[in-house]
Image: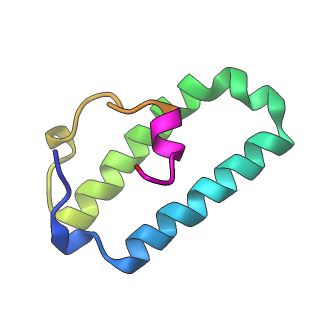
Amino acid sequence: MAVSAAYRGKSWRLSIMEQRREVARHLDDNLSLKARLAETMADAYGDATIGAARETDLEPDEFPAACPWTFEQIMAADF
């Protein structure tokens, strides 16, 4: 599902950039968390679908049930 252009503003892009940096720092500071990455991503994706549904007026079940991207894809600056 593509996100509508109406929801792809500068603030949205900058928030993603900021969160990627925060995640990278947190993982660097807590190397043991990498072992729990799949579990953490699944939890975060569930939260994210609820937040996205709130912001877009879509229903949570309109999003894929599981995150369709890998951690590496999500963290890539060009994603």
Task: Classify residue 11 by image quadrant.
Answer: bottom left
Q: How many marks?
A: 0
Left or right, residue 24 beside residue 29? left
Task: Establish if 63 lies above or below 36.
Answer: below
Left or right, residue 12 beside residue 1? right
Task: Establish if 1 lies above or below 39.
Answer: below
Front residue (pair 53, 24): 24
**Quadrant showing the N terminus:** top left
Residue 15 at x, y = what percent? 50, 68
Residue 69 at x, y = what percent? 38, 33
Task: Establish if 34 lies above or below 53.
Answer: above
Left or right, residue 78 beside residue 9? right
Task: Classify residue 52 by image quadrant.
Answer: bottom left
Q: Which residue is located at x 35 percent, y 57 percent?
A: 51
Q: Which residue is located at x 53 percent, y 45 percent?
A: 75
Residue 7 at x, y = what percent? 24, 70
Front residue (pair 79, 48): 79
Residue 35 at x, y = what percent? 70, 20
Task: Establish if 23 lies above or below 33.
Answer: below
Task: Classify residue 34 by image quadrant.
Answer: top right
Magenta-tinted stretch: 72-78
Q: Which residue is located at x 51 percent, y 34 percent?
A: 71
Q: Which residue is located at x 61 percent, y 28 percent?
A: 37
Q: Is residue 47 magenta?
A: no
